[in-house]
Amino acid sequence: MNIIKSIQSRTQNLMKKNFPASPYGMKLKKFKNIHNGERCFIIGNGPSLRAEDLDMLHKNGEVTFGMNRIYKIFPETKWRPTYYCCEDVLIIKEKQEEINAIPAKEKFIPVNLKWYEDVRVTGAKYFWLNYNRSEDFPHSFSTDIAKQIDCRGTVTFSCMQIAAYMGFKKIYLLGVDHNYSKIIDVSGNVVEDKNAGDYFCKDYDEDIKDVAVHDMRQSTLAYRDARRFADESIGRVTIYNATRGGKLEEYERVDFDSLFEVKK
């Protein structure tokens, strides 16, 4: 290891130990409760996601979170995410141009990928992504994104932690089907459903040649952790599932259309 890399490594280790005081953490602190008491929508990329639902969100000026390859639906809708988050190194590296072009107000990216994978996203707000459950703070759903965001196998979980930190009182999930054509279930069994879709468009994973087997164990635990956090918040945060169908049953289901009905 040369001197420059050695100094860089030591600096990164020091920042990791006290991330809230680092330049990255200080920028993240500014998001604390900036949407206190409001509602938001976290947009998943499941097959149930419809462009017309996104148009409704756009029409009503809702605050939304987009993830990963959400840009693939842009040609079908005027909607664009208020916030964007991605923690998949392959997506970021291979789709750098597309991600940089997303007109989100803010983009949240793991600093781990910047430090160790040389990932660069224009204007990104970098957070420390914790993969180690023994380092959860203060529990398995981080209440301080300036310190860390806990990774549980789905970027939706990261968005939920960011949303809670921002002070949103009601968090609605849309397009989070929590199901794929081929999965590993909570018991470790491989289950295939040829009638199930994976994403909102057929060429979502055009750069992946083999059919992915999605391990649902961690993501299932993640949604349970988020529900537990919401329950313990005693009404400060409530998570709802506004997805059309799907198999996520950890949260109270609400009819998406009813959220925009005009009251007489």
Image (cartoon, helix red, strand yellow):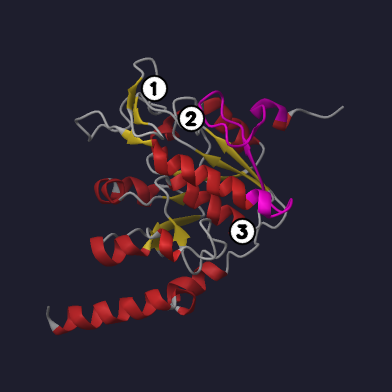
3D distance between C-alphas at marks 2 and 1:
9 Å
Instruction: Kindly state the secondary structure of the residue where label 1 is placed.
Output: loop
In this rendering, which labeled residue sits more in front, label 2 or label 3? 2
Q: Percent x, y for residue 87?
A: 37, 52
Element under disc 3: loop
Q: Residue furthest right?
A: 264
The three-letter amino acid code for the residue at tag 1 is: Gly
Q: Earlier in the sequence, mark 3 or mark 1?
A: 3
Name which residue lies at 30% across and 46% down. 91
Q: Is residue 14 above or below residue 80?
A: below
Give the residue displayed 25% in from the left and 31% down from the top. Answer: 206
**Residue 177, numbered circle:** 2
Q: Residue at x 48, y 30 (%)?
A: 177
Q: In the picture, residue 204 is in which quadrant?
A: top left
Give the farthest residue toward the top.
Answer: 195
Residue 201: tell me if it is visible: yes
Q: Quadrant of the N terminus?
A: bottom left
What percent of the width, then of the height, locates residue 112?
Answer: 33, 63
Tell whether label 1 touches label 2 (CB within 8 Å). Answer: yes
Magenta segment, which residues?
A: 230-258
* Residue labelled with disc 3: 166
Instruction: Report if residue 238 lies within the magenta region.
Output: yes
Mark 2 or 1, nearer chain start? 2
In the image, is residue 256 above or below residue 118? Answer: above
Dot label at residue 197:
1
Residue 39 drawn in magenta: no
Q: Residues within 10 Å of mark 1 (few under 14, many from 20)?
A: some
**SS of the residue under disc 2:** loop
